[in-house]
Amino acid sequence: MPQTRRLTSLVPLLAMAALAGITYWLLQATLPSAPEAPEQPKRHTPDYFADNFSVSELDTTGTTQYRLTAKSMLHYEDDENSDLTLPAMRMFQPQKPTVTATAERGTVNGDVSIVDLYDNARILRAAGFGDPQMQADSQHFRVLVNDDVIETEKPVKLQRGPSVITANGMNYNNVTREMKLFGNVRGAIAASDINGGASK
């Protein structure tokens, strides 16, 4: 009999424990979940760098279309842009002179579709295929790689053979060889250019 009484007295305790467990589970299930920690925004800090940086793009035949080099490259994690020291951009077109763009510093976006060149920036198109050498100097040039276009909104000095022209802006299409000058355009055009002695 005493053992039967002990078992009978344990039944309410077990029932209370089960009830407490169910109550705790229900409470946890109905409480709102703790908010997740907000994702930390990426900072404009370098995440990697490279010395003697070089990247090239090839066409379907394996021929180089352009090559971007720099003495050093510093990449930033937030916008995927990179700072360049002594950048040089070379663009190659079949049967046309090579065009080289250089500067003291520059930036390039993540997919290498836009290259900005700053401080003593220079565009040099080699002589050849009926064209004289052409040189353009400015404090900023933007190379739109996919369009094969070079432009600037800054004052520019253009030398094409013996012709010298200055302007407030420029747009040069490397495919069509078309040059557009904007703003206050001044200069001296050689007779050979006026008479059509050289192509665009």
Image (spheres, helix red, strand yellow):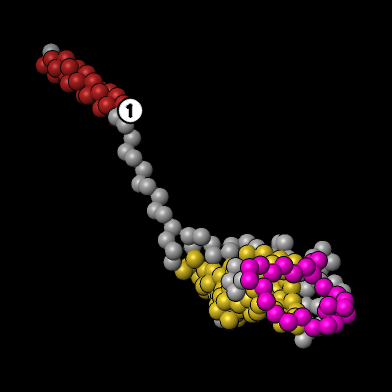
What percent of the width, then of the height, locates residue 14?
A: 21, 21
Quadrant housing residue 88: bottom right
Quarter of the figure with the N terminus = top left
Kindly identify the residue that appears in the image at 63 percent across and 76 percent down.
156
Q: Residue furthest bottom?
A: 162
User: Does residue 5 sit above or below 84 in this rendering?
Assistant: above
Determine crowd level at label 1: few under 14, some 14-19, many 20+ residues with C-alpha closer than 10 A.
Answer: few
Kindly identify the residue that appears in the image at 56 percent across and 70 percent down.
107
In the rendered image, is residue 15 in sight?
A: yes
**Mark 1 residue element:** helix
Q: Which residue is mark 1?
A: 29
**136 magenta-colored:** no
Whether residue 68 sits left or right of residue 191 in the image: it is left
User: Does residue 118 sit above or below 1 in this rendering?
Assistant: below
Kindly identify the residue that appears in the image at 78 percent across and 78 percent down.
98
Is 93 in front, or is 187? 187
Whether residue 123 sits left or right of residue 39 in the image: it is right
Is 98 in front, or is 48? 98
Whether residue 150 sits left or right of residue 73 in the image: it is right
Count of numbered labels shown in the rendering: 1
What percent of the width, then of the height, locates residue 53?
A: 61, 77
Quarter of the figure with the C terminus = bottom right
User: Does residue 100 sit above or below 178 in this rendering?
Assistant: below
Is 87 in front, or is 47? 87
Whether residue 21 sits left or right of residue 60 in the image: it is left
What percent of the width, then of the height, locates residue 22?
A: 28, 23
Q: Residue furthest left?
A: 2
Kindly identify the residue that appears in the image at 40 percent across and 50 percent down.
39
**182 magenta-colored:** yes
Residue range (magenta): 175-200
